[in-house]
Image (cartoon, rainbow, N blue to C red):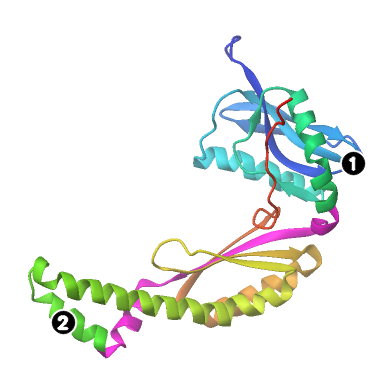
Amino acid sequence: MAEHEEQGIYLFCGIQTDQEDEFGTVEIEDTVREIFTIRHEDAAMVCAEVPMKIYHPNKDNLMFHQNTVSKVMDQKDTVIPISFGNVFKTKDDVKVLLENLYPQFKKLFPEIKGKIELGLKVIGKKEWLESKVNENPEAVKKAEAVRGKSEAASYYERIQLGGMAQKMVTEIQHEIKTEIFAPLKETAEAAKANDPLGEKMLLNASFLVDRDQEEAFDQKVNEAHEKWKDKVDFNYTGPWPAYNFVNIRLTVEES
């Protein structure tokens, strides 16, 4: 490692703790680095020393962040999420930050103790979505009309067809919300339906689940998948800390 390379402190997450915790090491850009904590009262930041620069959220970088957070979650039941890519200049800066955030942390600890976030994305299978459009006689008629025309002449019809397909996707999204999201929400402490990404995504949901309920929740996800698997794909992820349910603003207060 170049001697002159300026070092900074990378933040992974916050935890509630009353001891010096050991989380081992993490490999960041081919260098193994010690994971350590910076503490204040019964709170700590989980950190590593890294070259001071901007970290881009590519696959490897996201992995080092997620793997470290998972390691912490294996040991701790109260983990406060911190978004990817936060690097501070010195340990003292992190200490000041933690002291400033402590009133928020103190309030959050009892709310997220023993809770995890699970994510579920439901993606429509192309053939199924197309068959749904084809069930609509008006859409089929429009598609036929568009097929034989020049680009310019069919422009208006294509817009209409797009609008119709969009309307149908919106209806299917509503159905998925009722059939899949609503029953899962009952087992969760809290649930959020975020905006779907891309035209085939029908649900983009996050659930805050008590660790004791994780098995029951998994079971419900499996049952829903069994029922819908011919029509959609499930992308089920976690456990994560409560990224979608906790909003921490990371700013070093100007002195």
Visible residue check, residue 77: no
Q: Residues within 10 Å of mark 2 (few under 14, many from 20)?
A: few
Residue 49 in picture, x, y percent from top left: 69, 25
Please state which amino acid type lies under the numbered disc 1: Asp
Front position in the image: 227 or 255: 255
Residue pictured at 40% horizontal, 72% vertical: 125
Is 123 within the magenta?
A: yes
Q: Tag 1: Cα neighbours inside 10 Å, few (<14), some, or many (≥20)? A: some
The residue positioned farthest toward the bottom in the image shown:
137
Whole-percent x and y of residue 143? 19, 79
Q: Is residue 61 left or right of residue 248?
A: left
Residue at mark 2: 144
Q: Look at the picture and state if 65 lies above or below 191.
A: above
> Within the image, what quadrant is residue 55 found in?
top right
* Residue visible at 67% across and 23% down in the picture: 89
Q: Which residue is mark 1?
A: 42
